Image (spheres, grey):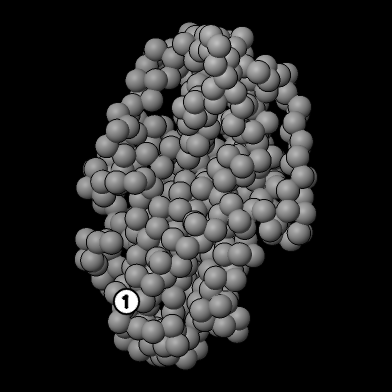
């Protein structure tokens, strides 16, 4: 039990780019993860995905589902559905105004409220009576070249307004830090590295003795707009897209030219890839196929778009990424309607593809140490969490700087929600909210 608990019931929501997790405390200091009776079996991890389809019997003519139910709906009827994943990545984007879903235009907050309604609905009794304290995690740095945090805060506020409770926002790595600190029995300085789907965030916390009146003090936070989705795209770009025509050529009159990269730009973002199936895009690809020197490659690209194979393609990419965390070689293989591709890849190749991303992560660690006024040797514990923390090259980055003995991990997908719920029960909640700490 955490010594600071004020025995106030609270809910912590980790709204992630790839997965979302909810935890709650009844006020006795114990935290429970909310389980969802998903189609594939009960799980505390709720995929951050939405599926829409047209249905006359539904008000507005647009039916929808979220999480694993969205995936099930999409796989059952892919050509009549619109599937969105990682929509959190556009929260701070000034260029994103709405998603065109059939005949409707849905803003970020519309998507968010729809997702949240399904998440709380599928939680059953666990979230039917919400406590007064709701704590939501937010990134230290949002995704994008020029993210607008103020815009993201406005959109988050509209998204979570439906909970009809005051929502407190806490940096996601601080949630993980607070939870990890509850395990410590001695004073320490703790650095948490949280690798999500869209961002990688770092926070440093000073942890006092268990009997201290104030157990944890946040010192600094920093973030980088790089994480699991970027690593997935490196595999897509370097391994898969060449099989779909990238780097190939086409004939224009008496010239042979390289296929413009713009044809492949939407493959960098899952939410955009899922919306590529439209007459204009398919007409453009048909013309490209006619002129391409390797029309079979363009056929494969058309199959991805026409049959909405993006979900399965990215699932296969994720499987390769996970395999390379425990193996030095892996095979990428995907088969779907009209498409069959395979290729071998080594861990060394993957690490070469993400080398520039690792360098930016390293710079993010530099920033959080500088903001805290600390050197690497003054960090007692490093807690790495999030799915990408399992990538050997990511872990090696921290082992080189801090030494293997100081590195800890575990509960990669649930640690943030667990800590957010604990913070919600704490008497010093205001000290942890984003409004009370320096913006990154």
Quarter of image, res 313 = top right
Estimate the x, y position of residue 140 in percent, counting from the top left. 34, 59
Estimate the x, y position of residue 325 in percent, counting from the top left. 69, 59
**Secondary structure under the numbered disc 1 in the rendered image:** helix
Estimate the x, y position of residue 318 in percent, counting from the top left. 65, 45
Residue 295 lies, with reference to residue 174, above or below; the image says: above
Task: Name the residue nearer the viewer: 104 or 284.
Answer: 284
Residue 156 lies, with reference to residue 193, above or below; the image says: above
Write the residue at 44% across / 75% down. Answer: 191
Write the residue at 29% across / 33% down. Answer: 95
Point out the image quarter for the C terminus: bottom left
Instruction: State the count of labels.
Output: 1
Estimate the x, y position of residue 366 in percent, counting from the top left. 38, 72
Q: Is residue 86 left or right of 286 when viewed as pictured?
A: left
Quarter of image, res 5 = bottom left
Q: Residues within 10 Å of mark 1 (few under 14, many from 20)?
A: some
Q: Is residue 139 visible?
A: yes
Q: Which residue is mark 1?
A: 370
Q: Is residue 68 left or right of 59 when viewed as pictured?
A: right
Write the residue at 76% across / 59% down. Answer: 328
Q: Is residue 6 left or right of 47 when viewed as pictured?
A: left
Write the residue at 54% across / 26% down. Answer: 258
Residue 292 lies, with reference to residue 145, above or below; the image says: above
Task: Name the residue nearer the viewer: 118 or 302.
Answer: 302
């Amino acid at each position: 039990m955490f010594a600071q608990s004020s025995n106030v019931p609270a809910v912590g929501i980790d709204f992630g780019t790839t997965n979302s997790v909810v935890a709650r405390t009844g006020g006795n200091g114990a935290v429970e993860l909310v389980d969802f009776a998903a189609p594939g079996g009960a799980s505390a991890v709720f995929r951050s995905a939405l599926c829409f389809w047209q249905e006359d019997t539904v008000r507005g003519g647009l039916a929808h589902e979220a999480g694993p139910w969205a995936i099930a709906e999409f796989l059952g009827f892919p050509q009549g559905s619109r599937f969105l994943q990682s929509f959190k990545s556009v929260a701070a984007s000034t260029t994103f105004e709405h998603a065109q879903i059939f005949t409707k235009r849905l803003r970020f907050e519309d998507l968010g409220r729809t997702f949240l309604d399904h998440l709380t609905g599928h939680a059953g009794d666990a979230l039917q009576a919400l406590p007064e304290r709701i704590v939501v995690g937010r990134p230290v740095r949002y995704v994008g070249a020029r993210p607008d945090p103020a815009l993201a805060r406005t959109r988050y506020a509209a998204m979570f307004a439906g909970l009809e409770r005051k929502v407190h926002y806490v940096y996601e790595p601080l949630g993980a830090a607070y939870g990890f600190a509850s395990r410590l029995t001695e004073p320490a300085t703790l650095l948490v590295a949280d690798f999500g789907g869209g961002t990688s965030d770092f926070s440093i916390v000073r942890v006092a003795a268990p009997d201290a009146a104030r157990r944890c003090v946040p010192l600094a936070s920093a973030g980088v707009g790089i994480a699991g989705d970027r690593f997935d795209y490196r595999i897509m770009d370097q391994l898969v897209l060449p099989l779909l025509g990238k780097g190939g050529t086409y004939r224009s009159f008496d010239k042979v030219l390289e296929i413009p990269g713009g044809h492949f730009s939407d493959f960098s973002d899952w939410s955009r890839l899922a919306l590529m199936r439209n007459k204009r895009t398919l007409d453009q690809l048909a013309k490209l196929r006619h002129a391409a020197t390797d029309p079979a490659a363009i056929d494969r690209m058309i199959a991805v778009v026409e049959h909405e194979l993006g979900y399965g393609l990215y699932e296969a990419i994720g499987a390769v990424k996970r395999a390379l965390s425990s193996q030095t070689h892996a095979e990428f293989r995907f088969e779907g309607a009209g498409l069959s591709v395979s290729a071998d890849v080594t861990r060394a190749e993957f690490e070469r593809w993400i080398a520039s991303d690792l360098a930016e992560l390293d710079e993010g660690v530099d920033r959080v140490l500088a903001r805290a006024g600390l050197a690497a040797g003054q960090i007692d514990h490093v807690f790495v969490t999030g799915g990408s923390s399992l990538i050997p090259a990511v872990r090696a980055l921290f082992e080189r700087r801090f030494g293997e003995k100081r590195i800890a991990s575990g509960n990669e997908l649930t640690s943030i929600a667990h800590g957010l719920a604990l913070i919600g029960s704490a008497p010093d909640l205001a000290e942890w909210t984003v409004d009370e700490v320096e913006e990154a």
